[in-house]
Image: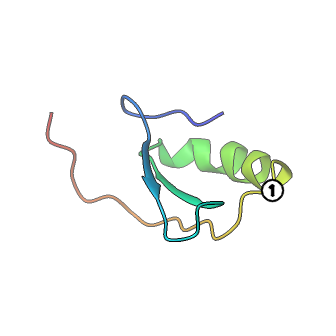
Amino acid sequence: MLPALQKPTISHLSDDDWVAVNTIIDESAAWDVIPRLKEARAEGIVEYPLNKVVL
């Protein structure tokens, strides 16, 4: 469901039932991806601008 530069980063949290997922997507894709994530019951979605990607 998540497009990404390569693969999303998945971090385990102190509550074993939760994980944090970080990914880089094109700004225009957010309009499609965020509603799909909410339909999949994702919570705490944070969108912020990216200044630079160094490959």
Give the class, few, some or many, for how many residues have Cα within 10 Å of label 1's Cα (few <14, many ≥20): few
Side of 35 where 47 appears, left or right: left
Residue that numbered label 1 is attached to: 41
Q: Residue at x 58, y 69 (%)?
A: 15
> Picture coordinates of residue 13 (x, y %)?
49, 65
Which picture quadrant has residue 19? bottom right
- The correct choice, above or below, for 4 with respect to 47 in the image is above
Side of 13 where 40 appears, left or right: right
Q: Which of 41 and 4 is in front in this view?
A: 41
> Picture coordinates of residue 26 (x, y %)?
47, 42
- Outermost residue to the left: 54
Q: Which of 17 and 1 is in front in this view?
A: 17
> Picture coordinates of residue 45 (x, y %)?
62, 65
Which picture quadrant has residue 7? top left
Amino acid carrying label 1: it is Arg
Q: Nearer the viewer, residue 28 or 47?
A: 47
Q: Residue at x 57, y 44 (%)?
A: 28
Side of 14 where 35 appears, left or right: right
Q: In which quarter of the image is the N terminus?
A: top right
Secondary structure, mark 1, is: loop
Q: Which residue is drawn at 52% across and 64% down?
A: 47
